[in-house]
Image: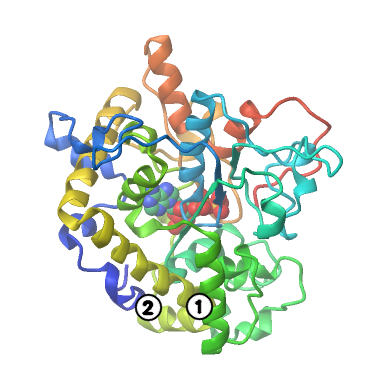
Amino acid sequence: MSNSAQPPQAEDFYKTDLEGRFFPSWTEVSKVGEVTLGEGQQARGVSAQGETCEPKTDIVFLKVHKSASSTVMNILFRFGEMHNLTFAFPMGGGNQLFYPHHFLAKFVQGFSPKSPRQFNILCHHMRFLRPEVQKVVSSSAVYFSILRNPVQLMESSFMYYKGTSAFSHVHSLEEFLSQPYHYYNATKSDSHYARNLMTFDFGFNPNGEVSAKRVQLMLKAIEVSFDLLLISEYFDESMVLLKEMLCWDLDSVVSFPLNIRDSSTKSPLSATMVEKIKDWNRLDWEIYTHFNRTFWERIDRDIGRERMHREVKALRQRQAELARTCLQGAGSVSPKDIKDSSLRPLQHGNAKILGYNLKQGLDKETEHVCRRLVTPELQYSSTLQPPQQPKKQTSNI
Ligand SMILES: Nc1ncnc2c1ncn2[C@@H]1O[C@H](COP(=O)(O)OS(=O)(=O)O)[C@@H](OP(=O)(O)O)[C@H]1O
């Protein structure tokens, strides 16, 4: 990651640890050897401070595109399945809540204004609209989302949404950035994939003017609605914050990265391109830099960096242990090498999305746990979804 792509606050936290490690985190940690159960193994129902707390089961997760949100969703699917929680599935059997429309309660399977219903977990892709969301969850629900550096987000989005109107006529992201208004038409229904995608997913206008006042209003509105904003560049730290907020144990937030791209479909970004992407996505940049700062302030306030370091270490050790138990080889594999077709993730645009092979000969219970960890979003969602009307939406974009 280019330094100039990174806002100030996030860089200095055990830098060397993070620089060498992005994917797959367990390959490095697995060298550590023995797995010890540290503070991270807090029993469910007991907070890190030793006070009792009730695990939270009413949850709204705004699944922001291209921000590691499928990995978070897998965590929610596993927790919900294990604890028999209800999910707000999209009506008609689709995978998205009629995105890119603003969310409406009636998009949820089983909800109708005449017989309103509340669900435990709302986590499928949607464009956020708080008053409508509030109709389908408890008033005590916890709201959270995840953000990603808009520079890397756009590079990912360009490859994944290569077929959309703004990107389909250019050969490279560089070409698009050389004259974006030539290719970008804000009135097209898929233009949001090309500019301020986070701003759009939070429900705001991605083409709005960037005045200080407007930015402040947007940040305030997000702050009022969301209890926690995770940062995908600091995924493990995010999981520690999440488990603390939800009063869950460490095992509940362990994951393998999902929906990850093969490096052959990633493009290097020059310093000039980084600056252009920041300018082009100015609203996203404002959101990201603000909540990246408050993320670290929250860690300092609630956990402290030393304890965070220990918790992250425990989490990575647990992931390494699970990887050794569950996976063939060192980690993710190319889609053509995934032996079990039910574990093959959706391939989209120009992105090559990696997956996993499970070890052979696992006992039934272990196989179940391992399979769930690596089941791609669409397959997992279908498994959990009760039988319903013929499908209306099918794609993952
Ligand atoms: N654990 C973890 N930490 C950091 N980053 C992660 C993690 N898991 C997934 N990813 C990266 O997230 C990108 C996919 O995001 P989404 O799952 O939100 O995409 S989607 O909108 O649902 O298609 C995708 O980014 P790109 O590889 O750059 O495309 C993934 O690599």
The residue type indicated by label 2 comes to: Ser
Question: Crowding at label 1, few (<14), some or many (≥20) Cα neighbours within 10 Å?
Answer: some
User: Disc 1, disc 2: CB below 8 Å?
Assistant: yes
User: Image point 53% across, 81% down: which residue?
Assistant: 215
Q: How many marks?
A: 2
Q: Nearer the viewer, residue 101 or 330?
A: 101
Q: Nearer the viewer, residue 105 or 3?
A: 105
**Pointer 2: what residue?**
270
Q: Earlier in the sequence, mark 1 or mark 2?
A: 1
Residue 84 image offset from top left, x and y in percent? 56, 24
Left or right relative to 214: residue 253: left
User: Image point 37% across, 37% down: which residue?
Assistant: 53
The residue type indicated by label 1 comes to: Glu
Q: Is residue 15 above or below residue 307?
A: below
Q: Is residue 164 visible?
A: yes
Where disc 1 sits, the SS reads helix
User: Image point 67% across, 79% down: which residue?
Assistant: 183
Is the residue marked 2 within 8 Å of ligand 1, measured from its CB? no
Where disc 2 sits, the SS reads loop
Q: Quadrant of the N terminus?
A: bottom left
**Pointer 1: what residue?**
174
Residue 73 image offset from top left, x and y in percent? 51, 42
Question: Crowding at label 2, few (<14), some or many (≥20) Cα neighbours within 10 Å?
Answer: few
Left or right relative to 248: residue 281: right
Q: CA distance from mark 1 to mark 2?
A: 9 Å
Q: Is residue 202 above or below residue 271?
A: above
